[in-house]
Amino acid sequence: MELTKDNLAIYAAKFYDNPCCRSTDEFYFDLARFSCINKLLFRQQEHGEIRERLVLNHMIVLQNVFPNRPALDAMLRQMIRENFHGILSAYLVFLNRKPIAEADAKTLEHLLRTV
């Protein structure tokens, strides 16, 4: 199944694995984490407000509820604005999800210094 904006919820549901999930509301709450990451990365890029622990928390939860790595990577590429991919890469490097060569150097340096 190829991921598009039209089939995002179906694609996400296919790879969603949360044994504690009791309703579709919880599923959509977890999907909203992508939006939260977008907002946090926007604030980081535009205003210099870095909330690295909150971004890392959202990303760790997403890794836990979407254990299929290629599927999560595809959803991140689709749902996170393209101009934030460099910053996002630094967080993925920090979480051992991506090679260091693909990271935004400034964000990675800040992460290594503060976390």
Image (cartoon, helix red, strand yellow):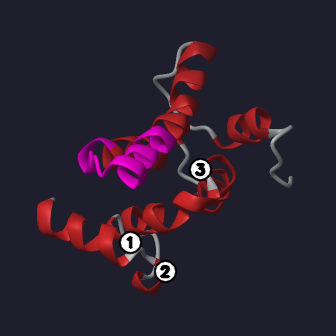
Residue, disc 2: 102
Q: Where is residue 96 in the image (x, y as percent from the top left)?
A: 37, 71
Q: Which amino acid does label 3 sit on?
A: Ile
In the drawing, does residue 81 fall left or right of residue 94?
A: right
The residue that appears at 13% across and 68% down in the rendered structure is 113
Could you say which quadrant of the image residue 85 lies in? bottom right
Question: Quick one: 22 or 79, which is closer to the camera?
Answer: 79
Say which label, 3 or 2, has the lower sequence index. Answer: 3
Residue, disc 1: 93
The magenta span reads: 37-54
Q: What residue type is labelled 2?
A: Glu
The residue that appears at 58% across and 32% down in the rendered structure is 31
Say which label, 1 or 2, has the lower sequence index. Answer: 1
Residue 59 makes an appearance in the image: no
Instruction: Provide the secondary structure element on which disc 1 rests.
Output: helix
Q: Position of residue 107 (x, y in %)?
A: 32, 67
Q: Where is residue 102 in the image (x, y as percent from the top left)?
A: 49, 80
Magenta span dominant secondary structure: helix
Question: Quick one: 27 or 5, which is closer to the camera?
Answer: 5
Residue 42 makes an appearance in the image: yes
Instruction: Provide the secondary structure element on which disc 3 rests.
Output: loop
